[in-house]
Image: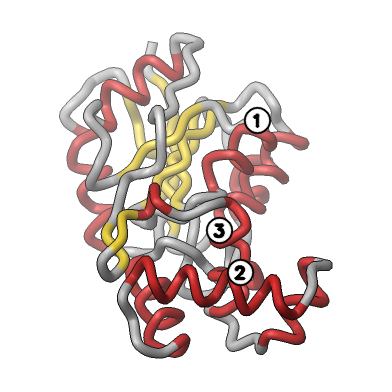
């Protein structure tokens, strides 16, 4: 049996690498290879697909998790492997909630993509034990509390303390305390530097991009 696959990834090199790997196996046929998640669900309706390799964050603003959710509602039998190079801490939880079958980090996963695809098609759900640990200033990403991560995510949007307090429904003093702890842990001297580095590393992504 030959399984039919679709690749959704905005990076040309990534798409071609996936295709190169898959073309070496007689078990797989790449039916579609597209650079946006925006219309991924329409490809699913038009094609007889078994599995979708879905990148998460696209440069055109489309989101692979949103597209995967639509696909799972339209064709729940189609397997989906979410792939990303960004260590955003919330994505694995959302992927599980959507019903995405497997999750693969491009640079950090121990298992190769062919192994993940094969096991997923066989009925397994393959997820890493944790998000890759990254360095943010002087601190490792595992050193932050869930609330500190929420505050940090809002900081990357340029939100002030008043706005953060309102959105998280906490006091202004609590926000200031969390920001102070973030600065102490990371060693950054300004909240702007902290926010920029958090965004550059991909540790947290602005919620409007998700």
Is disc 1 surrounded by few (<14), some (14 to 19) or many (20+) residues within 10 Å?
some
Residue 28 visible in the displayed image:
yes
Q: Residue at x 41, y 90 (%)?
A: 190
Residue beneath disc 3? 37
Q: Quote the CA–CA distance across marks 3 and 1.
A: 17 Å
Numbered disc in front, either 3 or 1: 1
Q: How is the image coloured?
A: secondary structure
- Circles 3 and 2 in contact, beta carbons < 8 Å: no
Considering only order in the chain, which callout, 2 or 3, is on the residue closer to the N terminus?
Answer: 3
Dot 1: element: loop
Return the x and y of residue 129 as percentages of the image width and height. 40, 28
Residue beneath disc 1? 99
Q: Residue at x 51, y 67 (%)?
A: 205
Q: Nearer the viewer, residue 93 or 144?
A: 144
Dot 2: element: helix
Q: Quadrant of the C terminus?
A: bottom right
Return the x and y of residue 45 as percentages of the image width and height. 68, 41
- Circles 3 and 1 in contact, beta carbons < 8 Å: no
Dot 3: element: loop
Q: Quadrant of the N terminus?
A: top left
């Amino acid at each position: 049996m030959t399984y039919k696959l679709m690749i959704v990834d905005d990076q040309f090199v990534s798409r071609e690498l996936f295709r190169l790997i898959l073309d070496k196996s007689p078990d797989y046929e790449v039916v579609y290879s597209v650079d946006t998640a925006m219309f991924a669900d329409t490809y699913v309706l038009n094609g007889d697909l078994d599995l979708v390799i879905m990148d998460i964050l696209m440069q055109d603003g489309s989101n692979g998790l949103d597209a995967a959710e639509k696909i799972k509602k339209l064709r729940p039998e189609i397997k989906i492997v979410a792939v990303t190079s960004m260590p955003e801490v919330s994505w694995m939880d959302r992927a599980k909630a959507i019903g995405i079958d497997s999750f693969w980090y491009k640079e950090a996963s121990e298992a190769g993509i062919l192994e993940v695809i094969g096991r997923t098609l066989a009925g397994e759900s393959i997820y890493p034990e944790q998000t890759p640990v990254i360095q943010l200033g002087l601190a490792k990403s595992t050193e932050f509390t869930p609330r500190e991560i929420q505050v940090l995510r809002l900081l990357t949007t340029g939100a002030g303390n008043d706005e953060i307090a309102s959105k998280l429904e906490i006091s202004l003093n609590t926000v200031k305390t969390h920001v102070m702890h973030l600065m102490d842990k990371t060693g950054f001297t300004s909240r702007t530097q902290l926010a920029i580095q958090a965004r550059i590393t991909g540790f947290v992504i602005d919620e409007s991009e998700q």
